[in-house]
Amino acid sequence: MRTLALWCACLLLALPCVVSPARAADSFDRCTRFMGDPTVGVAAGEYVCLAQDIVQPPDNPDTGRKYVVVIMHSGGTLDCLGHSLTVHWQLAINSTDPDVTVRNCTLRSTSISTGLLLTGDRAVVEDNVIEDFAGTAMQVSGVGSVVRRNTVRHIGGSAPIGIVARKDVDVVGNFIHDLHATGTAGTAKGIDAGGNNGGLVAGNRIRDVSGSGTGNSVGIATTGSTRNLIRDNRVVGDGSANSYGVWCTSTLARVRDNVLMGVATGLQWCGDAGGNDITH
């Protein structure tokens, strides 16, 4: 009945609702509220859903109001149900609280640097598409957090990064491609897991990541991290002299069973645990 009622509401409001039976059973019945004004944010414990795409106006209507599109609070969930948030200034999603979840969202912008920034512990970021940002697509920096099954693409700027993970974050099963730095010495990184002590980086697919000028092209960077595991990733480099598959600063970062192709240096200062397939 809940699903039928939602279908009727969508038809009456002429909203572009596309609902699969599986998604209806899994997500719609959890929704405590459907988001209208994104500046309201997600309150503690809420499960907020999107019923349509939301586009932020290109010009700030109030230059004194520097809000992000969605501010999330402890235990809150934002489920976009496959819909998109398009932003033109500030962040798309931000939270400093623990136990927040962002899923099934498409975040895009061509004029700001970061799409998603979560610094609270135990965050979950899953099944999202983040594209067209000019800097860092997403940063998750809370102990016990997980970033999984996301697609990150079309990221530019002077130092583009697909995913930044800090403080014991697992980065699993993501697809990252089309990151191109600008300028004379721009470094591009698919995943930056620096300072991610104890974290896991596994099963990610990274390709078409290119630095500019004298800058580096890095599939996975774990600078400053110890006792983390990088395994079963697939990195296709740009073949440049400054291309790296995995860049570490400690042999305590263990690297195993990765396929690293088109890179001048497969493993830089890492602990090689075996099974890595490296070709230029």
Image (tube, grey):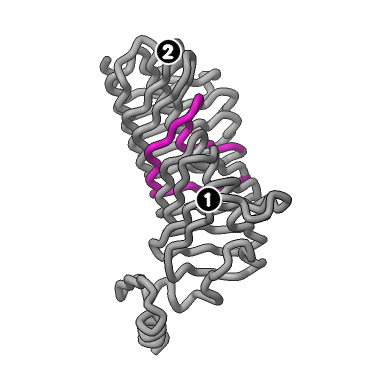
Disc 2 marks which amino acid? Gly
Residue 121 seen anywhere in this rendered image of the structure: yes
- Element type at mark 1: loop
Q: Look at mark 1 in the image and give the residue it sits on.
A: 58
Seen at 38% across and 61% down, the residue is 82
Disc 1 marks which amino acid? Pro
Mark carried by residue 213:
2
Q: Quadrant of residue 152?
A: top left
Seen at 57% across and 50% down, the residue is 59
Indicate whether 86 appears above or below 236: below
Seen at 73% across and 50% down, the residue is 64
Seen at 32% across and 71% down, the residue is 18
Q: Residues within 10 Å of mark 1 (few under 14, many from 20)?
A: few
Q: Quadrant of residue 73?
A: bottom right
Along the viewing direction, whichever of 60 and 262 lies nearer the viewer:
60
Q: Quadrant of the C terminus?
A: top left
Along the viewing direction, whichever of 88 and 276 lies nearer the viewer:
88
Residue 207 image offset from top left, x and y in percent? 32, 31
Q: Quadrant of the N terminus?
A: bottom left
Q: Is residue 29 left or right of residue 274?
A: right
Instruction: Please state the extent of the stretch shown in magenta in the rendering.
Output: 142-166
